[in-house]
């Protein structure tokens, strides 16, 4: 568990340093060459720095052990950070969309530079590499904060890709005499704003589901139930609830065992239920078992 946490922290630190460097490059080049699209992308990256700091902080908080005030641990800190990143992405998408739409009603701008195009290409390639790196670690370690950081990188790939298309067509249009190429950038920006907004919605919905204690997917719940039914002396599974709590899962089950069992026998069955589930799924950190009495021929109730 500690090794997984360290991998996640390293991924977020790499993302934070990369976001700071890319923001500086975009803002400096954008100011020197008066490139609104690169400046907009730089401002977007500045928002990523805030999102990455939130992910870093939440990842450290999530690893704190349970205490008297938080008996179930601090795992949902990562979920809150994921929700914050979703809000930041949504605001960035709206801002990009507004800027792009307003640009359509202005005369096309020329004077695109190959250096500006190079900065946009560098950002796109760098962000794609960061996305691949962080999404693998996030999925392997089931870290909500690392996954949020990965999807933030993916949104940047979209934004930088739009900048590459817009600036590239502008550069090409200057040589080919294409008047319309000056509008390629705002059109691409509108498309990107919609893609980023869709990504923000998906992230936000996932975070809300966890915060609202939504059950794990039915297939996963069925796997847990099958493990419980395989335990000796379990006569009936009355109820099973399983929910994500950040980067781990908590399960609450009600099972029926013979009503004439002693307390010790019931305790042993409970331990078998917990152990069978936790051995099969290392993401499960807590299994709460409630025992109901079972009598042959008597309906539950």
Image: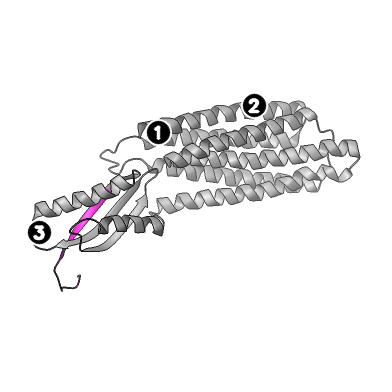
* Total residue callouts: 3
CA gap, disc 3 and disc 2: 69 Å
Q: Which element carries disc 3, helix, strand or loop? A: loop
Q: Give the extent of the magenta segment.
A: 287-300
Q: Is residue 31 magenta?
A: no
Q: Is residue 251 left or right of residue 79?
A: left
> Of the residues under marks 2 and 1, which one precedes in the sequence?
1
Mark closer to the observer (2, 1)? 1
Residue tagged by mark 2? 24
Which mark is drawn over residue 124? none
Residue 78 placement: quadrant: top left
Residue that carries the numbered disc 1 in the rendered image: 5
Label 3 neighbourhood size at 10 Å, few (<14), some (14-19), many (20+)?
few
Disc 3 target residue: 261
Sequence-first tag of 3 and 2: 2
Q: Secondary structure at mark 2?
A: helix
């Amino acid at each position: 568990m500690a090794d997984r946490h360290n991998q996640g922290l390293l991924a977020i630190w790499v993302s934070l340093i990369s976001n700071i460097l890319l923001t500086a490059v975009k803002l400096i080049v954008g100011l020197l060459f008066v490139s609104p699209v690169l400046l907009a992308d730089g401002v977007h990256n500045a928002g990523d720095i805030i999102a990455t700091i939130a992910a870093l902080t939440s990842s450290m908080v999530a690893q704190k052990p349970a205490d008297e005030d938080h008996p179930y641990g601090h795992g949902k800190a990562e979920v809150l950070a994921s929700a914050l990143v979703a809000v930041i992405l949504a605001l960035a998408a709206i801002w990009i969309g507004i800027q792009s739409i307003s640009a359509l009603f202005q005369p096309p701008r020329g004077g695109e530079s190959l250096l500006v195009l190079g900065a946009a290409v560098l950002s796109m390639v760098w962000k794609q590499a960061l996305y691949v790196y962080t999404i693998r670690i996030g999925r392997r370690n089931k870290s909500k904060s690392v996954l949020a950081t990965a999807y933030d990188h993916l949104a940047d790939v979209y934004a930088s890709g739009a900048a590459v298309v817009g600036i590239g067509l502008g550069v090409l249009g200057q040589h080919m005499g294409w008047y319309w190429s000056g509008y390629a950038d705002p059109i691409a920006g509108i498309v990107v704003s919609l893609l980023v907004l869709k990504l923000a919605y998906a992230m936000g919905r996932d975070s809300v589901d966890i915060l609202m204690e939504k059950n794990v997917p039915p297939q996963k719940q069925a796997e847990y139930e099958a493990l419980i039914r395989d335990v000796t002396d379990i006569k009936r599974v009355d109820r099973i609830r399983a929910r994500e709590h950040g980067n781990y899962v908590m399960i609450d089950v009600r099972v029926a065992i013979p009503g004439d069992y002693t307390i010790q026998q019931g305790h042993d069955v409970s331990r078998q239920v917990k152990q069978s589930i936790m051995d099969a799924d290392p993401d499960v950190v807590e299994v709460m078992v409630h025992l109901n009495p079972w009598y042959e021929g008597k309906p539950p109730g």
